[in-house]
Amino acid sequence: MVFAHSELRDRDPVSITAVKILIAGGFGVGKTTLVSTISEVVPLRTEEVISELSIGVDDLSGVESKTTTTVAFDFGRITLTPQCVLYLFGTPGQDRFWFLWDELSRGSLGAVVLVDTRRLGDSFAAVDYFESRRIPFALAVNCFDAAARYSVEEVRAALDLGPDTPIALCDARHRESVKNVLLTLMEYVLARANRLVEMRPGHLSGG
């Protein structure tokens, strides 16, 4: 399925074809669900059943019903426009698998940091990771049924995010909601890239 979007089609001078995007965040925030919801191909999953070995290691508070966990990465693909195909890599959420993030982030154009407001403190590490590496990211608040609702600006203040960082409320189970998150990220990435192009010496003079 192709998602038409004029702002992505018409942006210039940056042209995008195949794009690698990370879907990141803490343990149990819905990364696997998001990738599965939007992927136009059967998603690749590396989930394992949570065992007794996780006791005392993985914090299940707030996600007590979770029975599986990603141990490497999830993979999916979605065509936003004929000129823009996203390859989605969902990262593992547990601290002990964070060594994989450096490998997964190689060549990525941007990231979605998915958060759960019931466990907002788990989001700081992912936010710090992408900020420190200057990888552009959008924050997506996964609105779980049992979670309290907060405004975008309340979430921005709680995570101390700058005014330019895009934030979207979403439901990782709903395709249109996930599509909106990805479009929000891509608009941000393209606008940021175009600003960098315009700042290059000689750009205005054509040199």
Image: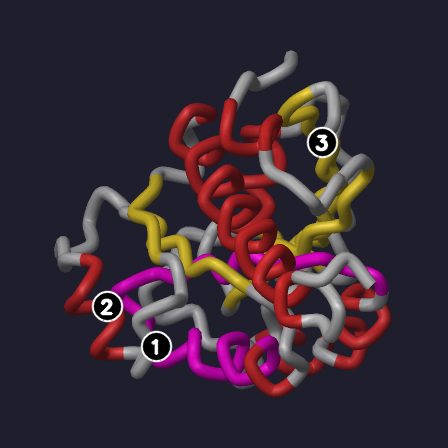
Q: Residue at x 22, y 42 (%)?
A: 145
Asked if the residues shown at circle 3 and circle 2 are in contact, with their CB atoms under 8 angstroms apart, the answer is no
Let me know if residue 78 appears in the view. yes
Work out which quarter of the rendered image holds the N terminus and state it: top right
* Residue corresponding to mark 2: 155
Q: Residue at x 75, y 55 (%)?
A: 73
Label 2: few (<14), some or many (≥20) within 10 Å?
some
Tell me the quarter of the picture where residue 17 sits.
top right
Work out which quarter of the rendered image holds the C terminus and state it: bottom right
* Residue corresponding to mark 1: 162
* Residue corresponding to mark 3: 84
Which x, y percent locates residue 116?
Answer: 34, 61
* Left or right: where 138 falls relative to 104: left
Instruction: For mark 1, give the secondary structure.
Output: loop
Which x, y percent locates residue 171?
Answer: 35, 38
- Say if 68 sits above or below 161 in the image: above
N-term-proximal mark, 1 vs 3 = 3
Tell me the quarter of the picture where residue 196 sits.
bottom right
* Left or right: where 50 falls relative to 151: right
- Say if 169 sits above or below 42 in the image: below
- Say if 163 sits above or below 193 in the image: below
* Left or right: where 134 falls relative to 124: right
Query: Three-letter amino acid code at disc 2?
Result: Val
N-term-proximal mark, 3 vs 2 = 3
Asked if the residues shown at circle 2 and circle 1 are in contact, with their CB atoms under 8 angstroms apart, the answer is no
